[in-house]
Image: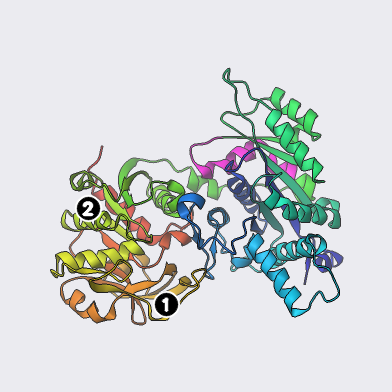
Amino acid sequence: MHTYEKERQGISLKYIFITGGVMSGLGKGITAASVGRILKNRGYNVTAVKIDPYLNIDAGTMNPGQHGEVFVLSDGSEVDLDLGNYERFLDIDLTSSHNITTGKVYRSVIDKERRGNYLGETVQIIPHITDEIKTSIRNAAEEEIPGQEKAEVCLVEVGGTVGDIESMPFLEAVRQMRGELPEHDTVLIHVTLIPSDTMGDLKTKPTQHSVKTLRELGLLADIIVGRCERPIGSQTKRKISAFCDLGQNGVISAATVADIYLVPMELEKEGIADILAGQLGLEKRTADSDWYHVVTREYTRRVNVAIVSKYGIEDVYLSIKEALKHAGRALSTEVKISWIDAERCDERQLEEYDGILVPGGFGKRGIEGKITAIRVARTKKVPFLGLCLGFQLSVVEYARNVLGWEDATSAELGEGRHVIAILPEQKDVTDLGGTMRLGNYPVQIKDETLAMELYGNGEIVERHRHRYEVNPQYIGELTRAGLVFSGYNQNRMEICEIPDHPFFLATQFHPEFRSRPTRPSPPYLGFVGACGANKKSK
């Protein structure tokens, strides 16, 4: 049943469109997620859509150093990191349909044209591309979310900034939807930069120009969220209100905060909940404060964790950073992260950290440094968590330094004894996009292991993103030498651990993708707890 049919039956799905101006990276995704959290705290069922104007079908083949983390959804979709923020803030599981890209839209329209769906028509941006965009948004909004009733509110974030040529068809589709839907069924939030000059005065001109560009596209902002370093005063709000043709209460201050999970609280203080309720015709409800109690829990101690990687960019491993934060909050432990260059890691320096983490990745660069870090963690009894490639390299390190197989390596890395082999179904893969072992797979856990202690369940489900596995040919010898494979999927090893160690656990899957502020990932909880018990750093 699509939205317009729902309306005729008296059920109205609300849409909140979020656009950005002046510059990218202002925090549209966090704004959208925060607005969703505010509504969720009032008992509304919320879903979210991210529009990415790039021509890629998905984020899977992009360089994370340029684009940021590739987030993996439960259905195996490789998507923009903002969907990770939506899942964490809203505590829901999204699917491929919730990430709309130019590549997806154009491929769908071209496929329809080839099948003859448009016979006799000249296929154009308007109406064919914009109709496809609107259909994609509606379908995502109406898709059932596991564990949640049908959505009452759909957040739609339009990537990029107004004025970008890539975003034009999407903004036109938004304009059309706002005209087609009843007045109180849509709201447009425009996120813009309000910088300070050298005297510390907030400047509104960039916002004025951004809103002017939005108007030229036929779109009027109902709410302006001003990103700034310090809160916006009433005088600045009056000026923006006058120049941008909206009520002063519609100008929302979004000053930089220490933690992204504090953003909903800051927006609450600005009264955005009542503004949205009024504009969308929603019942004004009292907020449930349980979520806020979790994200504001005070720290009573601090641990220092080294993440050994070839990337020194936090956005590449955003979900890891957030999962450590979730576990830290639950344990009242602040987790301070040091990003260690895998090509220059110092063995003695690593021993001084309370814990060592080796994340996933691809390629040869920095591999030996990661193996060194794993050896230090194993031999010096430093709590260790390995993820995906970190799991595979843990097996390589054990084979080299315990079994004495100096040539042990991964098939991904070149010649040698391949204790890590390519998955059989990956051998003949030629297309690289969306072809890895992706998404949710069950994992069986053995009794009387660290993994069972952490999960407390004999079967779990976690998200994957890999092409390689532990070579079945060597599992027996590795096991007899003392390496414990405590989790598996049929004949595929999923978790390894080392007995008589404060905490040494590595997973083929990515537990960080399912971690939430209110439901921290078990491996991360165990790791942060072990780091606290192993406290060395100041």
Residue 40 colored in magenta in the image: no
Nearer to us: label 2 or label 1? 1
Judge the density around disc 2: few (<14), some (14-19), many (≥20) Cα neighbours within 10 Å.
Answer: many
> Residue tagged by mark 2?
382
Quadrant occupied by the C terminus: top left
Q: In which image quadrant can residue 237 be found?
A: top right
Where is residue 400? Give x, y as percent. Answer: 17, 66
**227 and 300: which is toward the camera:** 227
Mark 2 and mark 1 lie on one chain; the one further toward the N terminus is 2
- Find residue 435 and name its label: none
**52 and 354: which is toward the camera:** 52
- SS label for mark 1: helix
> Residue tagged by mark 1?
426
- Judge whether residue 174 can be spotted in this image: yes
- Judge whether residue 498 can be spotted in this image: no
Magenta range is 256-276
Kind of residue indicated by mark 1: Gln
Quadrant occupied by the N terminus: bottom right
Q: Is the magenta stretch mostly helix, strand or loop?
A: helix
Residue at left offset 57%, top offset 61%: 92
Q: In which image quadrant can residue 369 be found?
A: bottom left
Q: How is the image coloured?
A: rainbow
Relative to 235, say whether 517 is above or below: below
Relative to 13, say whether 111 is above or below: below
Residue at left offset 52%, top offset 70%: 434
